[in-house]
């Protein structure tokens, strides 16, 4: 049972949980045998050391200085701003328009507050543990050298993005870190304490998002094994969707669900938000090329095609089953297409993108509209139904439609006759889902039995805006 004397220990217990996990991870990783190679930087260093030894005994040439490309830098700055726009105002408006009027400010505040909090945490420690070399524990977690970004000079570059300043690469990855936890808000709308929300966002970023980003993108074990995730199908969408599902189950259903009117307050806001998400997603997917080249161009084309196909597919299913294509369905279909093409965008051609988009529109429609009702969980704004399911679907279909002629880093099942890629994709999906599910449950359980995670029935009935923020929307 919850004790009033136990409540003040909330911050301490949560901090202890975070610190313990971060300290334990390197120790566990050091005991693992047969870990993958630590990082691209280590491989490059080894190759550079071996080459002079095999050559004639001549003086080693001085390595050419890294050249920062102005075109790549300009594109990545643009992409970073586009991705930031996806959260504020894009996601904020998309979610804000779907809740009731009495909770719209609270919903907007979740996206805005998360943006501020995660920016600071990313600068202090998040980037370091996600995208730097962790040495002996690099398979599972990055290092701590970049705490407070102290080594990041004006002309510094990262081995993961050698043609742009590291400050730009850090900023680009920061925008990914911002939107991923913010997506979770769609599952817990209308009923979570704002204090618990912010603590959950910060803890989840450090204990879930950063390790998984490192596993896939930072030189960790999943990326080294060959799992394909171009821009975040598992790192971002399955990850956020799984956490959203856990949060929805632990919070319980909204008061009055099924008996009261929960219709969206202003779908015009949601259409504007979805449109901003669609436009911003080109920074998300095409920006993940980390260069301004043909790979970025194909990723952009694939993104547009899949999104349009998913919109039509969701619309078509509604037309067949409900006899009318709803505006909410159209924008939901578009987001489902954006989600599903994310892991595949840099690995597939236009044909593959079309198939992935159609599949996403149909599968996510049934998941968000019918399966949710059948099972009975309250994923308020379909975080799991669209992002979780769509992210997993996209990751699996990446293994099906990846084409070596598009990206030499991937060989898919259909075009390159490589069924083993499917094994790697399922491994990626399974590892992210299980780790995120367990860690999200632990974080929420600590919060639930210390400060509490759900507002009172009275607050929920009157509205979160006036009770949590002291403000209301007029008109």
Image (tube, rainbow, N blue to C red):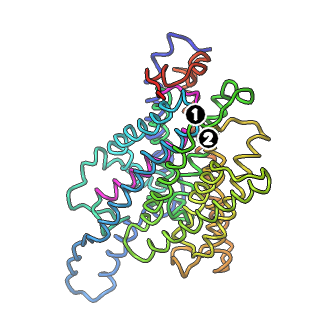
Q: Is residue 409 above or below residue 454?
A: below
Dots 1, 2 in contact, CB < 8 A: yes
Give the CA distance from mark 1 to mark 2. Answer: 7 Å
Please tell me which residue is depicted at 45% across the width and 73% down the height of the picture.
297
For the N terminus, the image quarter is top right
Provide the residue designation for mark 1: 189
Q: Residue furthest front?
A: 475
- Name the disc covering residue 381, or none: 2
Please tell me which residue is depicted at 76% across the width and 36% down the height of the picture.
376
Asked whether, in this view, residue 57 is left or right of residue 18, the answer is left
Expressed as whole percent of the image width and height from the top left, the position of residue 4 reads: 52, 10
Q: Is residue 402 above or below residue 131?
A: below
Name the image quarter holding residue 268: top right
Name the image quarter holding residue 154: bottom left
Looking at the image, can residue 20 be seen? no
| SS under mark 2 | loop
What segment carries the magenta color? Answer: 167-194
Expressed as whole percent of the image width and height from the top left, the position of residue 79 reads: 38, 60
Q: Is residue 382 above or below residue 278?
A: above
Q: Residue furthest bottom?
A: 56
| SS under mark 1 | loop
Expressed as whole percent of the image width and height from the top left, the position of residue 41 reads: 37, 66
Asked whether, in this view, residue 77 is left or right of residue 387, the answer is left
Looking at the image, can residue 321 be seen? yes
Q: Is residue 184 magenta?
A: yes
């Amino acid at each position: 049972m919850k004790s009033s004397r136990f409540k003040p220990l909330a911050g301490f217990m949560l901090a202890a949980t975070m610190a313990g996990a971060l300290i334990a991870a390197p120790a566990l990783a050091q005991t693992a045998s047969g870990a993958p190679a630590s990082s691209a930087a280590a491989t490059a260093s080894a190759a550079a050391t071996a080459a002079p030894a095999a050559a004639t005994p001549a003086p080693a040439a001085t390595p050419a200085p890294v050249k920062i490309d102005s075109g790549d830098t300009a594109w990545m700055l643009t992409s970073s701003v586009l991705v930031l726009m996806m959260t504020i105002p894009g996601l904020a408006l998309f979610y804000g328009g779907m809740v009731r009027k009495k909770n719209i400010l609270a919903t907007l505040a979740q996206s805005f507050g998360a943006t501020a909090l995660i920016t600071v945490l990313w600068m202090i420690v998040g980037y370091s543990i996600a995208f730097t070399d962790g040495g002996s524990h690099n398979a599972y977690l990055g290092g701590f050298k970049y705490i407070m970004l102290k080594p990041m000079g004006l002309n510094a570059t990262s081995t993961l993005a050698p043609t742009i300043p590291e400050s730009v690469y850090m900023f680009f990855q920061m925008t990914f870190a911002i939107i991923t936890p913010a997506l979770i808000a769609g599952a817990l709308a209308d009923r979570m304490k704002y204090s618990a929300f912010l603590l959950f966002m910060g803890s989840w970023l450090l204990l879930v998002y950063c390790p998984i980003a490192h596993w896939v993108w930072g030189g960790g074990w999943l990326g080294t094994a060959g799992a394909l995730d171009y821009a975040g199908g598992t790192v971002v969408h399955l990850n956020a969707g799984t956490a959203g599902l856990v949060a929805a189950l632990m919070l319980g259903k909204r008061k009055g669900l099924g008996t009261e009117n929960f219709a969206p307050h202003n779908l015009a806001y949601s259409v504007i938000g979805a449109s901003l998400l669609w436009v911003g997603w080109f920074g998300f997917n095409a920006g993940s090329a980390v260069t301004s080249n043909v790979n970025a161009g194909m990723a952009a084309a694939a993104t547009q095609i899949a999104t349009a196909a998913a919109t039509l597919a969701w619309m078509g299913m509604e037309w067949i089953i409900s006899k009318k294509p709803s505006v909410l369905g159209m924008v939901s279909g578009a987001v489902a297409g954006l989600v599903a093409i994310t892991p595949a965008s840099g690995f597939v051609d236009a044909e593959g993108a079309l198939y992935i988009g159609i599949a996403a529109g149909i599968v996510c429609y049934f998941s968000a509209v019918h399966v949710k009702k059948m099972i009975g969980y309250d994923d308020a704004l379909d975080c799991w139904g669209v992002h979780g399911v769509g992210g997993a679907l996209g990751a699996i279909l990446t293994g099906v439609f990846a084409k070596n002629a598009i990206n030499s880093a991937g060989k898919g099942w259909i075009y390159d006759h490589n069924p083993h890629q499917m094994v790697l994709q399922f491994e990626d999906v399974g590892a992210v889902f299980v780790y995120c599910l367990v860690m999200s449950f632990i974080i929420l359980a600590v919060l639930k039995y210390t400060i509490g995670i759900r507002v009172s029935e009275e607050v929920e009935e009157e509205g979160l805006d006036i009770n949590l923020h002291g403000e209301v929307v007029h008109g």
